């Protein structure tokens, strides 16, 4: 703003300099989804977005690698609300799955009631993994595989029918001469 005339002026963004805020939220959201949800590498994510924008958007590797942290910070309030809603639901589906973070094995505890879904990164399965999760003080039905840890929590238990279906499909595949498994 000119001190003399009061007119506001704006210089164009310098050519050849990338500013992540000049890309807008859509480019960052796409980069996050490609990299974190679709498991596309950082280099390939950059390449795809650059190609889609005819080379006008070239995201930095550092910005892409920090997107999950920014997303986590931005969703903290919503994650707390999901946590609270899960603790009040009549049933929770729960399962641990393995993953790797920077070459280190980690566990991801998934908790869902069919409407809400919460992923919790843990160093361990078992009781240490459940500590601080919606399952820790949960008193209703937990639907899970046969991980014995889950039996120490909740009011009652149900086996996940997806697991039963897998067992039946394995039986169909391995014992084609039987018929009871197909009928079920």
Image: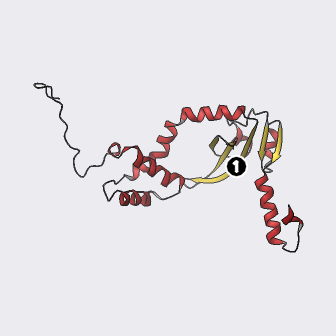
Q: Quadrant of residue 151?
A: top right
**Does residue 161 lie above or below 9 as drawn?**
below
- At x 54% / y 52%, what residue is drawn? 37
Q: Which residue is mark 1?
A: 96
Relative side of 20 to 66, left or right: left
Place of residue 114 in the rendered image (x, y in percent of width and height, measured from the top left): 69, 43
Height in image: 166 above or below 65?
Answer: below
Q: Quadrant of residue 164?
A: bottom right
Residue 29, compared with residue 80, is above or below; it is: below
Residue furthest to the front: 183
| Residue in the picture at 63% in, 41% down | 118
Q: Residue furthest left?
A: 4
Is 21 positioned to the left or the right of 115 in the image?
A: left
Label 1 secondary element: strand
Q: Is residue 20 left or right of residue 176?
A: left
x, y (%) of residue 172?
Answer: 82, 68
In the foreground, 123 or 45:
45
The spot of residue 111 in percent (x, y) is 68, 42
């Amino acid at each position: 703003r000119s001190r003399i005339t009061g007119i506001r002026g704006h210089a164009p963004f310098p050519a050849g300099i990338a500013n992540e805020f000049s890309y807008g939220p859509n480019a960052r959201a796409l980069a996050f989804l490609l990299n974190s949800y679709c498991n596309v590498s950082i280099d390939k994510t950059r390449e795809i977005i650059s190609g889609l924008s005819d080379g006008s958007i070239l995201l930095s590797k550092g910005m892409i690698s920090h997107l999950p942290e920014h997303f986590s910070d931005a969703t903290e309030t919503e994650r707390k609300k999901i946590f609270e809603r899960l603790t009040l639901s009549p049933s929770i589906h729960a399962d641990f799955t393995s993953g790797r973070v920077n070459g280190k094995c980690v566990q991801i505890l998934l908790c869902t009631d069919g409407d809400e879904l919460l992923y919790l990164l843990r160093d361990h399965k078992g009781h240490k993994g459940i500590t601080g999760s919606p399952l820790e003080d949960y008193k209703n039905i937990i639907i899970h595989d046969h991980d014995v840890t889950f039996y120490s929590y909740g009011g009652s238990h149900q086996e996940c029918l997806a697991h039963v279906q897998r067992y039946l499909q394995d039986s169909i595949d391995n014992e084609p001469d039987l018929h009871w498994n197909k009928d079920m």
